[in-house]
Structure formats: C-alpha cells, structure tokens
Image (spheres, grey):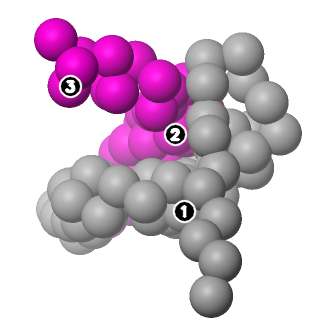
Amino acid sequence: MNKVEVEFNTSLDIGCIICGICSFFLPGLGQLLQGRVCTFFVHFTVAVIIGLITVGIFWIPMALYSAYNAATYSKQVIAKNLEQ
C-alpha cells in the first residue's frame, strides 16, 4: 500500500483553501484533513462549548479563526522547527 503525503504551505494552494473552507463550516475539520488530530479536537471542542454557552452567537468568530488557521498552515515550517 502506497502512502500519499500532501504538503501544505503558506502560499494558499488549493489544499489549504479547501481545508479553510471545511474549517469554516465545521471548526477543526480542515485541521483534521491536514492530519492535525489534536488541533481538530481543540478547535471543535472550543467551538461547541462557546456555541452552547452563547447560543451560537460566537460560533462564527471561532469558525473564522479555525478557517484562517487551516488555510495558513505550513507543514514545512513545522518540519524546520523540528530539525533545529
């Protein structure tokens, strides 16, 4: 079985844009598509808690932040930090 690795960078390629759109509709989904499972759980849990407490009023700011975070994620930056 071949392993396929998708690289994301800050130049907003199509993968980043799709992940950003997914995270807008369901905060954390774009992070999950990028393979960042812990970040997915944090974004999704915070969005649900904020949504329940504020009856959905502050769901949109969390969705916007999650979309921005997914769209601007760069695997290369993380790899460079790990090498140092």
Under circle 3, the secondary element is helix
- Quadrant containing the C terminus is top left
The residue at the point 83 percent across, 39 percent down is: 14
Q: Disc number at residue 70?
A: 2
Vertical side of 8 occupied by 74: above or below? above
The residue at the point 61 percent across, 35 percent down is: 8
Give percent across and percent down for residue 43. 29, 53
Drawn side of residue 51 relative to residue 77, left or right: left
Q: Disc number at residue 33?
A: 1
Q: Residues within 10 Å of mark 3 (few under 14, many from 20)?
A: few
The residue at the point 20 percent across, 25 percent down is: 82
Under circle 1, the secondary element is helix
Q: Disc number at residue 1?
A: none
Residue type at mark 1: give it. Answer: Leu
Vertical side of 61 occupied by 22: above or below? below
Vertical side of 52 occupied by 21: above or below? above
Give percent across and percent down for residue 62. 38, 43
Drawn side of residue 41 relative to residue 62, left or right: left
Q: Residue 3's quadrant in the figure?
A: bottom right
Residue annotated with mark 3: 82
